[in-house]
Amino acid sequence: MLTIGPYVLPSRAVLAPMAGVTDRPFRILCRKLGAGLAASEMLTSDVRLWNTSKSRLRMSHEGEPEPRVVQLAGADPAALAEAARLNVDRGAQIIDLNMGCPAKKVCGKLCGSALLQDEPLVARILETVVSSVSVPVTLKIRTGWNRERRNGVSIARIAESCGIQALAVHGRTRADFYEGAAEYETIRAIKSTVRIPVFANGDINDAQKAREVLDFTGADGVMIGRASHGAPWIFRSVNAFLADRNAHAALSRTEVRDIILAHLDSLYVFYGEGTGVRIARKHLGWYCEQCFPDSAQVRRDLMGASSTAAQFALASKHFDEWVHRAAQAA
Ligand SMILES: Cc1cc2nc3c(=O)[nH]c(=O)nc-3n(C[C@H](O)[C@H](O)[C@H](O)COP(=O)(O)O)c2cc1C
């Protein structure tokens, strides 16, 4: 049983926080399809920047299943603590701290994985935030600053001693950005060092890989990011495979179409007309890679729609045809 504080997670496979992707509609969708947890897109700890529509949407949790996780990014312990408190007041049930993002600057200062090079600052941030909220605080890191200074184990020790209640580790260093393959040796070393739950992250793109990474690292769970793009049902198949290697969790084309159309609808409701079309375009592009890998025409057609009504009508048409083609071939 995988628990974080008082919360028992329904699955060992969780959605990775991804700015621009893990908005409320996508989190709710992935949770419905079996993700054990789904953290929000990172929110800056600088409360002066919260008065934008982007930040307001990032802090919205209506209809989201528990536990609601808010990820914060920043470098100033007091500001992070204040941001954590405010988010708990607004419904966050777990606060996740981002020390995994490779961007040079988030909110104008070095933060994210850049913090990994300053262990005393990491300790100050973690102690301050943990002591300022009553909910569990979790941490997301990379394996270290760079390959010469892979200090993930040391950071994990600091995290545990500061009261962090779960750790997600992306198997790359900050210097790696997204290049090369993720390595899992450091995650294994971290897991064997600390007693808090550890999630292995990086390049887990199907159920088989999830099983292999869990077996190799001994991690308590896996965190899946990019492989959920256009395939939020990956959590369903990982869960089924982890429960029984011979289980088949494949969805019918009808079910896939219905999920995609309902996803579009939820994006329109959440973002409204203009932004709704733009955000839905991104997801449609990913769904096209899954469902129409050989049809540039369908993709062009869907990308060209400029209103929610036109986009939805085109998506219905193309995904209906996709369902019927399979029925005819059967
Ligand atoms: C588009 C995108 C946005 C991301 N944004 C965040 C973020 O806001 N916070 C964070 O901790 N990591 C972020 N990440 C990193 C992911 O959480 C994850 O660690 C990384 O993608 C590796 O996992 P994967 O190979 O399963 O995608 C982001 C990754 C991507 C691709």
Image (cartoon, rainbow, N blue to C red):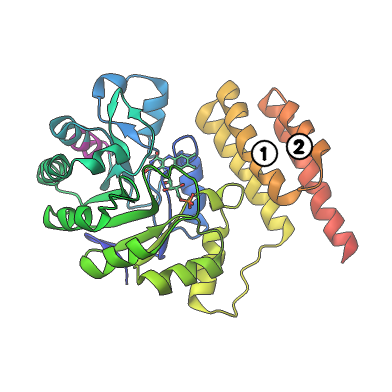
Instruction: Give x and y (percent) for residue 279.
Output: 57, 31
Q: Which amino acid does label 2 sit on?
A: Arg
**Vertical side of 8 occupied by 309: above or below:** above
The circle on residue 285 is 1
* Near-viewer residue (232 or 158): 158
Secondary structure at badge 1 equals helix
**Vertical side of 310 occupied by 142: above or below:** below
Q: In this view, does 144 lie to the left or right of 16?
A: left
Q: Based on the picture, tell me whether residue 36 belongs to the magenta stretch.
A: no
Magenta-drawn segment: 84-90
Instruction: Give x and y (percent) for residue 224.
Output: 47, 55
Q: Quarter of the image containing the N terminus?
A: bottom left
Instruction: Give x and y (percent) for residue 6.
Output: 22, 61
* Near-viewer residue (139 or 322): 139
- Residue at 85% across, 61% down: 327
The answer to whether residue 8 is seen in the rendering is no
Secondary structure at badge 2 equals helix
Q: Residues within 10 Å of mark 1 (few under 14, many from 20)?
A: some
**Vertical side of 128 occupied by 234: above or below:** below
Q: In this view, does 323 lie to the left or right of 133?
A: right
Q: In this view, does 260 lie to the left or right of 48?
A: right
Q: Which amino acid does label 1 sit on?
A: Gly
> Which sits earlier in the primary sequence, circle 1 or circle 2?
1
Q: Quarter of the image containing the C terminus?
A: bottom right
* Near-viewer residue (192 or 91): 192
Q: Mark 2 points at which residue?
A: 299
* Near-viewer residue (225 or 55): 225
